[in-house]
Image (spheres, rainbow, N blue to C red):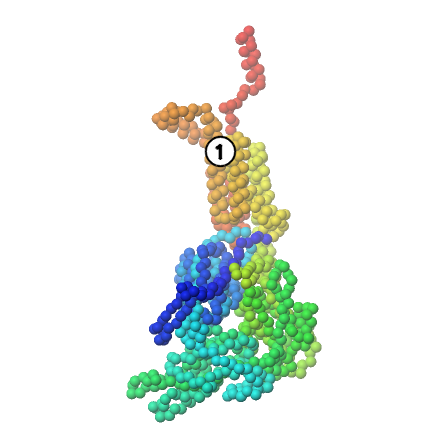
Amino acid sequence: MANNTILGQTFYLNLCLLITCSALRCFSYDDVQGGSYNSFTVSSFSYSKSELKPYDWRYIKVDLPPWFSSMSISLESNVDLDPRSIGKVPKSSLPIICLREGSPPLPDAYNTSVPGLVLSPISEGSFGGNQGLQIAEQCYPMQKNVSVRLTNEQIAPGIWYLGLYNGIGSMRTQSKMISRGPAYSFSGNITVEGCMTPMMWGPYCNLSVNQLPCVGSSSLTRSPLDSLVDNQTAAIVASCGNVNEEFCSGDNEPKLYSLDIMDIAEKITIAATNVRFNQTQPSNGTNNSSGIILMCYARRGAIPLSTMHDYSGNINDAPLVIQSPKVGRWYISIQPVNVSTTIWGVQDMSTKVCSSLEWQVLQCPVNKAGLNCTLDRYALQTFIRRNPSAPFESYYLPLSDKVSSDSANFVLEPLLSNSSHGRNLDATWTYFFLDIPSGAAGGNIHVRLTSDAKINYEIYARYGGLPSLSSFDYFYANTSSNSNDSMSFKLYDSSEEMVSFYILYARGGIWCFALRHLSPAGSTSKDQTSMSISVERCPRRCSSHGACQAFMDASGLSLYSYCLCDRNHGGFDCSVEIVSHRGHVWQSVALIASNAAALLPAYWALRQKAFAEWVLFTSSGISSGLYHACDVGTWCALSFHVLQFMDFWLSFMAVVSTFVYLAAIDEVSKRTIHTVVAILTALMAESGPTRSNNIVLVIAIGALGLLVGWLIEFFTNYRSLSLSVEFFLNMLHGWQNIKGWIHDLMKTLLKRFRWGFVLAGFTALAMAGISWNLESSESYWIWHSMWHVSIYTSSFLFLCSKVKTVNTENQRPPPDAIYELTRQDSFSRA
């Protein structure tokens, strides 16, 4: 299998806290809502110029701390795409840039399309504006200049990955001998700004955020929200609020709060108390609060706005309830709506709404879950697999006496909850929690269910919170109802007895898997269902058609993996058949059998008793056939690297040897030129054998060798000429002599070669050059086979073009003539 050079490298943006005041980047905006703010550079990383070859990619990892205010991305590249023709560019050659939270982006995991690909140019409005970054992954065409500033109103704190790709598709991971096509380079800088004051937040660090203290309580604690909590004797309630503190705000004057959810919670309830106007309303002379609209916006990880939020509601009418909130920091914005009044046509801005705020966080005891804390939940323990070829793989087992640790599978029936969830009496829920380290975010979660009979379970997965029928990230209900259309979900096996799927590049943190048992209440089925949950570096071990490659990022803290597939398969898991079996046979025959063209120059060299050239052409044809037999996966006589080196080195030597053969020089000079050429071509074959400019270099070296051979021949034939000053003077003034010398030289060249063969040889050489330039990953086998035939045919024609000459300058008479001359001389002396 070819050793492909596609290497997805990851750059890590380290946090560098700048302590000295001179290094701080401080800003003061007095015109922004009448306040001022200070920010400083949390981290700044500059990326030097880097080249992306076809189907190559790079990952840039950025860590955004909780107090960050903005992230500025500035990239420069040599990409020149017309925005009007982006839709016509095939995805296999389209440079794109992707952004994903928590784990590296994988835009071509979904084989039919890229759901997150936006064909419009990237801008700040692409990620935010009035919508924000609403999906987990977005991709945009790469541009010549990219300058984007993302604020904490658009993206949440945490780890973000920026992926740059030069073409996507199934062939991105296919092993290729050559990588030719348009390449582009990029360089840039990424800067993260943070707020200096802990309680100040927002894009300009000018928003005051209040964090209310929360105190855990039991069922003995009473508050206005206790009536909303079911079965308080089983629940742990954390009550928070500012009951004794009243705040007043008017239009466009939000009040901000933050709440940290450190563990899995069932729900958050937010309510307003003592809602009133700060002054008597002139319309009816009363201070009735029933018509007040007090909007509450909640959002995890970022400041909520009226246009960007996760939950909202008028808490003057009813409390805002957030079911199954995710772990992390939540931000709540309280904002009155339309509280200003008009008196005699003048807008009165002094009217404000005053109220107190209270919220509750409902959490169940350990090993319990659900709104009434009657469902079972299990923490999963990590077991590391000892596999040197795939490091950092693990499987998970529940912490329970009902499960044996001897196997990676565990039986579900002893772990199921005994009570139903909600009002649906024909289904029960059981929850499993596992924690993936942030450094292993490049792994894949593998979930597998097997049963003796029909599987009566639905699986729901969610990151950072409890899944439900209305709140989940991924799910599997049956073969027709699942998340297989999602970019990061891949379903492999789906039958009545077995279900197997992967969550690709799962982000680090807490994951919850919920099993919904569909058997009706009172069911006494004796069928057993086994479940396994594991983290694997590559899905399905690359489907046995590739090798799993693992790489650490520059910090050494994160690991990601990808499949390097063989020549016939591609895709992120090597499951896509790019070359069929019949096509593989045709490619193998073409690439191997086309080397039979080496018999033509080898035969002619042997006929002319040019044994050095005969050895070169014969060895070149044999080594090229063996190399391509290994390259297509048929048979490898030696290691791939050795075969590749021998193929290219002997091919280069054969081309140069053809040129040197055309010069009529002695064997000593020929051996000297061959030795020098052997060293140069060996360096080329070892350092970069598949470079597209190698053909030009080889022809240039061959032409230089021919020129050196002709010079040696010239000075050998005309060594009797005197190089005195008078000779040069005569040459300068004797134009007739110069013309005669040129005429003799042209006459010699015309007699030296058969020019019909020379013209045919250059034609075949031009065909070889065209075939070399037309080679691509898709059509490599066709044009490289043509290259074999063309280059060997051109060598054969050039060898045939040389006329065999007889050197008569130093030719001695035959022995009989010498004997006759001796006898005549002796008779004359007598």
User: Going by the picture, which residue comes out furthest to the front?
Assistant: 20
Q: Position of residue 148 (x, y in %)?
A: 41, 65
Please give the name of the residue rendered at 42% of the width and 89% of the height, measured from the top-left corner.
Answer: 290
Q: Amino acid at mark 1?
A: Gly
**Which quarter of the figure is the C terminus placed in?**
top right
Residue depicted at x 49% and y 55%: 54
Q: Is residue 277 visible?
A: yes
Q: Is residue 737 visible?
A: no
Q: Quadrant of residue 28?
A: bottom left
State whether residue 519 is above or below residue 678. Answer: below
Q: How many marks?
A: 1
- Name the spot of residue 371 as percent of width and height, x first: 57, 82
- Answer above or below: position of 622 versus 420: above
Q: Where is residue 565 shown, x and y percent of the image?
A: 57, 57
Comparing 378 with 69, the one in front is: 69
Task: Say which quarter of the image contains residue 610.
Answer: top right
Q: Does residue 765 sit above or below 711 in this rendering?
A: below
- Point 59% across, 62% down: residue: 538
Q: Residue at x 61, y 78 (%)?
A: 366
> Where does residue 314 sit, x and y in percent of width and height?
44, 84
Q: Could you tell me which secondary element the residue under label 1 belongs to? A: helix
Compared with residue 474, is residue 775 higher up or lower down, i.e. above or below? above
Check disc 1 and report the residue beneath it. Answer: 709
